[in-house]
Amino acid sequence: MNRGLVNIKTRHIFREYMVNWWTLRNISDEFDSAEVPCHLEYEPPEPGQRRTLIEQYYHAVDWSNWRDVKKVLKVYESVLQSVLETEELTNSPQLTTTRRRAGS
């Protein structure tokens, strides 16, 4: 990964969220819908199918090119929306009531 408009730490944070919470299908759907190319021949040193897939998308991005980065930001927007929806669900009155009834 080259340095660019989105720093490496930020890329890793988003990658790890997707690795932990999304399926391979979700990952490819989001990157593909944002028209981020995928370099399938690239074999990153990171282990795991999801991590590898994300790194293959990342590898095809010119991180100094605003057009490329803008596509990845669309994916990050989806990640943030997912986090927000999960947070709303976690704090929903229905879930709180269910937790109380379950004794947790």
Image: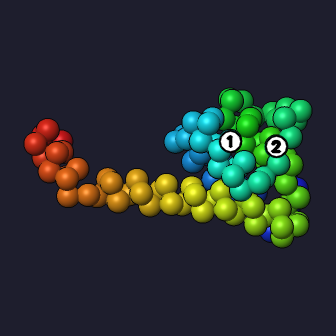
Secondary element at image label 1? helix
Question: Residue shown at 83%/70% (left/top)?
Answer: 66
| Left or right, 99 with reference to 11 | left
Badge number at residue 59: none
Q: Please name the amino acid that badge 2 sits on.
A: Cys
- Residue 38 point in image, percent of width and height: 82, 43
The quarter of the picture where residue 42 lies is top right
- Residue 46 point in image, percent of width and height: 75, 34
Question: Residue shown at 26%/58% (left/top)?
Answer: 92
| Left or right, 16 with reference to 86 | right
The quarter of the picture where residue 67 lies is bottom right
Question: Residue shown at 71%/56% (left/top)?
Answer: 34
Secondary element at image label 2? loop
How many marks are shown on the rendered structure? 2
Quarter of the image with the C terminus is top left
Rounded to the nearest angstrom, the CA distance separating label 2 from label 1 is 9 Å
* Pick the front one: 44 or 81: 81
The crowding category of the residue bearing disc 2, from other C-alpha atoms within 10 Å (few below 14, some 14 to 19, many at least 20), is some
Residue bearing mark 2: 38
- Residue 48 point in image, percent of width and height: 68, 29
Residue bearing mark 1: 28
Q: Please name the amino acid that badge 1 sits on.
A: Ser
Q: Earlier in the sequence, mark 2 or mark 1?
A: 1
Q: Is residue 19 visible?
A: no
Mark 2 and 1 residues: CB-CB less than 8 Å, in contact? yes
| Left or right, 60 with reference to 80 | right
* Pick the front one: 30 or 45: 30
- Residue 25 point in image, percent of width and height: 62, 36
